[in-house]
């Protein structure tokens, strides 16, 4: 995963698709690993204005970045998502869809990724149903120059098949966890964004 600049909320004619891709990329980065101090500082220095659902959620994340540092965020990430034994909060779709890891939902996802010409890199330890990987795939589907896969139908199909039924549960679990501070803000933004995406796909 590569770091991305925080999204800027723009009007549709100024790059709505770019903004969507940027936000998926940012969420992929934040869920993949603890953010660097440089990324926290970049988000903290971003503008936070507007009264829409996403603008308000973005303002919450900006404020969270201004009030923390990389080390406590790293400790929070490790406590919530790694830990000893079972993680406090699971980031894998198979867990929410079947109650177990490495189950049928993951096999179906791998089939769809293969059809898109995508596969997990040898250096990637996490399975493909990790929320960071799914967000990165959505970023690719929006921003890729591959005209076969970039259209809205492909985005809608992938989101509906592999994210829509469980991402709200993940975000709710994070926001409710007593030890989630920075990642509660991330989940607040992610949950709002995913809900907007669902409504948009319903109208597509």
Image: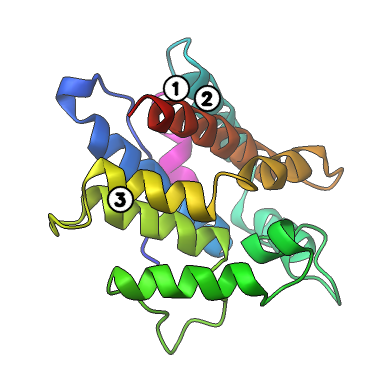
Q: For this rendering, which residue is in front, 147 or 90?
A: 147
Q: For the N terminus, give its image quadrant.
A: bottom left
Near mark 3 (Cα within 10 A), the count class, few <14, some 14-19 or many ≥20, is some
The residue pinned by badge 1 equals: 48
Q: Are marks 1 and 2 in contact (CB under 8 Å)?
A: yes
Mark 2 residue element: helix
Q: CA distance from mark 3 to mark 1?
A: 31 Å
Q: Mark 3 — residue?
A: 154
The residue that disc 2 covers is 59
Q: Residue at x 33, y 44 (%)?
A: 22
Q: Nearer the viewer, residue 151 or 28?
A: 151
- Does dot 3 land on a helix, a strand or a loop? helix
Q: Quadrant of residue 97?
A: bottom right
Quadrant location of the C terminus?
top left
How far from the left and from the top, in percent, is residue 203? 37, 24
Q: Is residue 122 above or below residue 77?
A: below
Q: Measuring 77% from the left and 70% from the top, which residue is drawn there? A: 100
Tell me, yes or no, whether the two marked residues, 2 and 3, touch with CB atoms within 8 Å: no
Query: What stretch of residues is rendered in magenta?
Result: 40-47
Residue 195: x and y, percent?
54, 30
Q: In front: 1, or 170? A: 170
- Marks 1/2: CA–CA distance: 5 Å
């Amino acid at each position: 995963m590569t770091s991305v600049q925080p999204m800027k909320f723009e009007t549709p004619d100024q790059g709505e698709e770019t903004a969507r891709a940027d936000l998926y990329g940012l969420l992929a980065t934040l869920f993949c690993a603890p953010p660097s101090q440089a990324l926290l500082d970049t988000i903290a220095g971003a503008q936070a204005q507007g009264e829409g659902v996403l603008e308000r959620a973005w303002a919450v994340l900006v404020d969270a970045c201004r009030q923390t540092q990389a080390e406590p965020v790293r400790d929070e990430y490790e406590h919530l998502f790694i830990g000893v034994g079972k993680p406090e909060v699971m980031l894998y779709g198979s867990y929410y869809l079947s109650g177990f890891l490495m189950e049928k939902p993951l096999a179906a996802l791998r089939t769809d990724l293969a059809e898109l010409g995508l596969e997990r890199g040898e250096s990637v330890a996490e399975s493909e149903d990790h929320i960071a990987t799914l967000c990165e795939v959505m970023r690719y589907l929006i921003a890729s120059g591959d005209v076969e896969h970039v259209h809205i139908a492909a985005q809608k199909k992938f989101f509906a098949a592999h994210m829509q039924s469980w991402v709200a549960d993940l975000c709710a679990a994070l926001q409710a966890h007593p030890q989630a501070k920075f990642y509660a803000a991330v989940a607040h933004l992610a949950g709002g964004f995913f809900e907007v995406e669902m409504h948009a796909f319903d109208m597509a």
